[in-house]
Amino acid sequence: MRFRGILVGLAVAAAAVSACAQQPTVEQFLSGVRAKYATEPRLVQAGFSCELRPVWQEFPQVKYLGPNSPLLDRLKRTRVRLMVTKGGTPLIEVNKAKKPDLDVKDLATVDQLLASTRQMMQGFYETWLPFGIIGPSAPAGASMQTVTVKPVGLETVIQYQQGSTRDWMSFDSESRMLHFTQLLPAGAAVQESPQFEASGDGLLYTGANFEIHSGQSDGKPDTLGAYRIQYQKMDGLRVPKTVEVEVNGTLDVHFQFSDCSLGD
């Protein structure tokens, strides 16, 4: 009888372990997701930098300038560099050219284009970091549930609060993230839909579609856009070769990455 009781106890314990195995924690689930992604965590562990070369003629303000335009010459002489410290903090460093001389209006145009470049590259890095460098993560206290969404089927949804913002991540049954949504104060929101393709290293992040809501436009997005990435290798690590940024159907600009190096 005592032996039978031990067997029953072991069976109950095994059932409990099985139940726990079927209901992973948020971190266990995300660890499994990251294992299926083609990521490069060493990039943030060591830090890295790349020179950025915008194709300036693709900006509407520059598109119709001639090849000998002083404004275009000034932009081409300016150096822009993405610098990421150990731990992943980015800095878009801009060394403005001093020549050729420009009038006040053209100087304002140069400053506007450089500010747009900073903003677009900052936004790109903030999507590349969680999807293509370290993989998705969530803070302690995040909750997880499985829901049925037609016609996709089962989705795993993770929710959490960070200060005044609320975040949602949803994944399909193949571990592809479908959406990342951030609800900001006053009804503003940002939603990203990362794109992946199969590779020998796992699901490779190839860009994202995004929409931005101000909360003032009856649910319609104020901004629609996309990032598209082509890769190259640097010290055996995958870094962008070209990033294309599209915004509202009126802007389509390519940024070329070169002179990349590992370490601060």
Image (cartoon, rainbow, N blue to C red):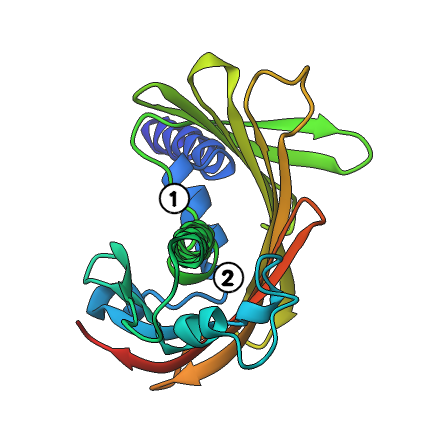
Q: Which mark is residue 137?
A: 1
Vertical position of residue 244 compared to residue 190: above or below: below
Residue 17: x percent and y percent?
41, 36
Q: In front here: 12 or 44?
A: 44
Residue 178: x percent and y percent?
63, 43
Q: Give the residue type that dot 1 points to.
A: Ser
CA–CA distance between discs 1 and 2? Answer: 13 Å
Q: Please identify the quarter of the rendering in which residue 148 is found.
A: top right
Find numbered disc 2 in the image and state the secondary structure of the residue it sits on.
Answer: loop
Q: Earlier in the sequence, mark 1 or mark 2?
A: 2
Assign the N terminus to one quadrant of the image. Answer: top left
Neighbours of disc 2 within 10 Å: few (<14), some (14-19), many (20+) = many
Question: Which residue is disc 2 drawn over?
Answer: 37
Residue at (40% x, 61% y) in the render = 133
Residue 36: x percent and y percent?
52, 60
Residue at (24% x, 54% y) in the render = 89
